[in-house]
Amino acid sequence: MKKFLVLGVLFILPLVAYLFFASGVHNFAKLPVLNSTIGSIENFETLDSTQITFKNKITVLGFLGKDLYQKEGNAFNLNQKIYKKNHEFQDFQFVMVVPFGSEPEVKELLDELDTIANVSGWKFLFGTPERIKELFNSLKTPHTLDERLGTNYVYIIDKNVGLRGRDGKLKENESIVYGYDASSVADLANVMNDDIKVILAEYRLALKKYKADRTNTAKSN
């Protein structure tokens, strides 16, 4: 009986593992770089005058526009479905771009979000309409900003300041994904959450390899 049980485990477990990995293929493949020439954010201002950068950070970039209340639901969706699950990752940040004059609304939104999770990873950038449009256009996506300088879409920017997404080559009939619709809980939960896992896993593996290489080098010396 034990013999058949052992044989069953040996044959069934690999099959179950295969089905699991196959169903979440994006979790185990590198997220493609769609654009490696994203514009600078050095000319934007922040609430506390700190310098925000894309470099060496994994960033969720959004454009909330004027009348922040119009995109408040998007912010809460992102906070619940993406931020809460990943904000403890050291180099992970949310960067939301808004026009000058939105400071009071931003402070109020941060206070509301803070009741759900620590908002230290939420960063807001303030700029002129021209600078906001310039940054958005540098993403080179098919999306557009509305008349309030906002969009429902958010974007994943990697540590090398490249736009990450799906290039449509991994699965048959898969569309290119430049950004994620923050007004759609389904899009965040089923697509963006998957892709965030991919890029975080990528950097975790890179960090482990770096530490292992340093350890081996130290031992050899």
Image (cartoon, helix red, strand yellow):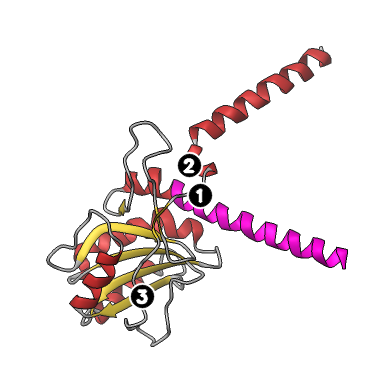
In the rendering, at what x and y percent does residue 40 appear?
A: 36, 75
Q: Earlier in the sequence, mark 3 or mark 1?
A: 3
Residue with the mark numbered 3: 40
Is residue 18 rendered to the left or right of residue 165? right
Residue with the mark numbered 1: 198
Q: Which amino acid, by three-letter code, is at mark 3?
A: Ser
Separation (CA) of disc 3 from disc 1: 25 Å
Q: Is residue 107 visible?
A: no
**Quarter-wise, where is residue 153 in the image?**
bottom left
Instruction: Describe the element under mark 3 as helix, strand or loop.
Output: loop
Residue 179 is inside the magenta segment: no
Q: Which amino acid, by three-letter code, is at mark 1?
A: Val
Magenta span dominant secondary structure: helix
Q: Are marks 3 and 1 in contact (CB under 8 Å)?
A: no
* Range drawn in magenta: 194-221
**Quarter-wise, where is residue 33 in the image?**
bottom left
In the rendering, at what x and y percent does residue 163 appear?
A: 39, 59
